[in-house]
Structure formats: C-alpha cells, structure tokens
Amino acid sequence: MSGLLVSREGGIMRITLDRPEKLNAIDGEIAHKARIAFEEAAIVHDVRVVVLTGSGRAFCAGQDLADPAVAPGSDLGLTIEHFYNPLIRAMRALPKPIVARVNGVAAGAGANLAFAADMVVAARSASFIESFSRIGLLPDSGGTWMLPRLFGHARAIGLAMLGERISAEQAHAWGAIWQVVDDSDLDSACDTLAETLAQAPTRALGAIKAAFEATATSSFDAALDRERELQRLLGMTRDYREGIEAFAVKRKPEFEGR
Ligand code: T3D
C-alpha cells in the first residue's frame, strides 16, 4: 500500500508510515488506510498487539503541508472530521494494546499519533514537537486531551504554545512515554515489549485501556462501578481460568486472548 505498510507476524500487527522522503508526513488517504488497519486489528482475533512506527529517519512529521486539502482557506474541520478523528478514535477504541515505536522526529499530528498509543518506546535520538502553533494551528488528533494528561497542564500548555522540540529523554523524564532506549536497541526493546503484550491476557488489557479512558470523564464512584462490571466479565474468561490454574501449579500461564 502506498504510504502505509501493514504486516502481521504471530500476534503482532505492524503498521508503518512509509513516506520517508517526506518524513512520513500523512494525508487523508494514509490516515484512512491506517484507520482501516486499526479496525482490522480490532476484529481479527489473532492480532493481540499493534506496533505503529515510521520508515526511515522519522516517525511522522504530521499532516503533509503540501497537500492541497489543507491549503490556507480550506476547511480544516473537514479533513479532521473525515480522517484524523476517525483514526485517533480507532486507536483509542482498539481493545488491544498499541506500542508506538518512535524511531525519529514526531511532529504535529505525528507526535499525537504516538501519544495516542498505549505505550511509547522511543529511540534516544527521537524527538517530539507540538509544531501546530508554529503554523498558526492548535494541537489536534486528541492533543488537547492527551497532552495535559501525559505531561501535566504546565508542561502541556508550554509545549503547545511554544511548539518547541523536546528530546525523547525529556519526554521520558517528564513521565510522558514508557521507555527511551539507545537507537541500536530500539528494535529489540519494541520486539520484547510487543511479544510480552501479545502473550498477555488480551481481554484484560482491553478492559484496562477502556477503564483508564473512561476515568477522564467520570467520578471516582463511577470508576469503582466500572471496575466491578469489567472484573465480572474478566472473571468469566478462559484467560482468567488459565491464570489461576497456572498460579496454582507454579507454571507460566499461556494466555489465548479469550
Ligand atoms: O485539517 C488538517 O488536516 C490540519 C491538520 C494538521 C495536523 C498537523 O500535523 S499540523 C503540523 C504539520 N507538521 C509540521 O508542521 C511539521 C513540519 N516539519 C518540520 O517542522 C520539520 O520537517 C521537522 C522538524 C519535522 C524535521 O526537520 P528536519 O530538518 O529534520 O527535516 P526537513 O529538512 O525539514 O524535512 C525533510 C523533508 O521532509 C523536506 O523535504 P525536501 O526539502 O527534502 O524535499 C520537508 O519539506 C519534508 N517535510 C517535513 N515535514 C513535512 C514535509 N513535507 C510535507 N509536510 C510535512 N509536514
């Protein structure tokens, strides 16, 4: 597929933004294809984790600024409604973990695509730029919601207003990403994490993701009720049975994601 590569190996789906000559800048077509891939990941049982990454030296430079669809004066609300919001919604609604393998710069919507993943592993040379304000825009792709949660209000608003580049190490030190590793270790770190997640009880991970997401708009009391209901469902799964049986005989559980 032009602009996007999708592959599957074992329980891992890899989605690679593939326009290296433009630092993997995306347009509506690529965003649409990525959304379809996430939606496929949701319904194919054998997919237990998705790894999102970029080809070449960048993760993603955000919207392709040469795309006529976003020329000044055009209705940016339309591209957001038709392409970006459905993609980010598909990622957040996916009941399976997403790992962002951030191999280089992640700018604008590219940064927020990474932050929309559940766990971000970045190469030490990678960086993040909320570059929207540099071109007179505000963070989209969920940025206004995610940034304060990941960075805290003070840092989030500074990043959004100044559009300054921060290093992967800085993002990690601020608690916004899971891991930063030497560039040469990026593949092994991502593979290890993805394989671990692919062998985990997928339905439990999906429930964790959904429950965390819901806390953003609900009370502590509602969270307790939600935990009760989700735990009720998980208590009926094969993976819970396997977890308990494995614990009892001191062996490693073999989860099937059911
Ligand atoms: O409704 C809507 O759709 C609006 C949605 C907006 C969402 C957004 O994402 S807005 C933000 C868009 N992104 C940006 O503003 C970032 C623009 N890029 C940069 O600031 C820099 O390229 C980077 C800081 C990311 C990297 O800098 P550097 O020096 O490492 O690379 P470079 O030389 O600037 O870029 C290399 C090539 O990629 C270059 O092409 P060339 O000269 O070699 O032919 C450059 O033009 C191209 N490129 C980089 N980013 C984009 C891009 N081409 C199109 N669109 C880009 N976003």
Image (spheres, grey):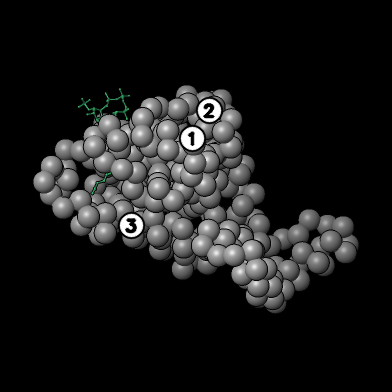
Residue beneath the point at 52% across and 39% down: 151
Quarter residue 209 falls in: bottom right
Residue identifier under label 3: 85
Callout 2: SS: helix
Q: Using the image, determine if residue 217 lies above or below residue 147.
A: below
Q: Residue at x 52, y 32 (%)?
A: 171
For image coordinates 76% across by 71% down, the residue present is: 241
- Distance, label 3 to label 2, CA atoms, is 28 Å
Q: Is residue 149 shown above or below 56?
A: below
Name the residue carrying label 2. 170
The percent position of residue 160, horizontal first and vertical second, equals 38, 37
**CA separation in Å, label 3 and label 1:** 24 Å
Label 3 sits on what residue type? Asn
Name the kind of residue labelled 2 in the image: Gln
Label disc, if present, on residue 225 of the rendered structure: none
Separation (CA) of disc 1 from disc 2: 11 Å
Label 3 or label 1, whichever lies nearer to me, is: 1
